[in-house]
Image (cartoon, rainbow, N blue to C red):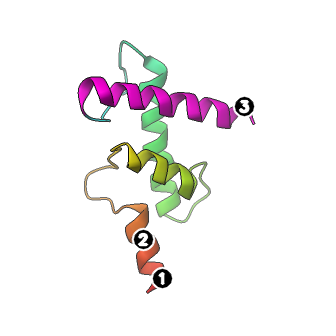
Amino acid sequence: PHGSVTWKLRLGELHEFRKKYKHCNVPQHFIDNRQLGKWVCTQRSAYKRMMDGKTSTLTPDRVTALEEIGFVWPHGSVTWQQRLGELQE
């Protein structure tokens, strides 16, 4: 699907951003790549929806892919792996 291709493209751009800036906190209005800034904001919103038990475009595989490159969810939020561990207990 088109969305999957775009998602992978943005993930690659985020990876390059991290290499350059040593973090994944892309400003929402990042001048060098406005689409990436908006995408990062969208991922955080989708994560919140997922954690609230609502419909979300974020999948566990996408959460893992983001966390593997050092993506940080909003301060104070738990990681997907922590929630999964709680469910397994």
Q: Residue at x 31, y 49 (%)?
A: 74
Q: Which of pointers 1 and 2 indicates the residue nearer the eye?
A: 1
**Mark 2–mark 3 distance (CA, rounded to whole Å):** 29 Å
Expressed as whole percent of the image width and height from the top left, the position of residue 53 reads 54, 65
- Residue, disc 2: 83
Which class describes the residues within 10 Å of circle 2: few (<14), some (14-19), or many (20+)? few
- Residue, disc 3: 2
Q: Residue at x 33, y 44 (%)?
A: 70
Location of residue 37 (image quadrant): top left
Expressed as whole percent of the image width and height from the top left, the position of residue 34 reads 44, 18
Expressed as whole percent of the image width and height from the top left, the position of residue 12 reads 48, 29
Image quarter in which the C terminus is found: bottom left
Location of residue 85 (image quadrant): bottom left
Q: Residue at x 54, y 58 (%)?
A: 60
First of labels 2, 3 by sequence position: 3
Which range is magenta? 1-22
Which class describes the residues within 10 Å of circle 1: few (<14), some (14-19), or many (20+)? few
Q: Amino acid under label 1?
A: Gln
Report whether residue 27 is seen: no
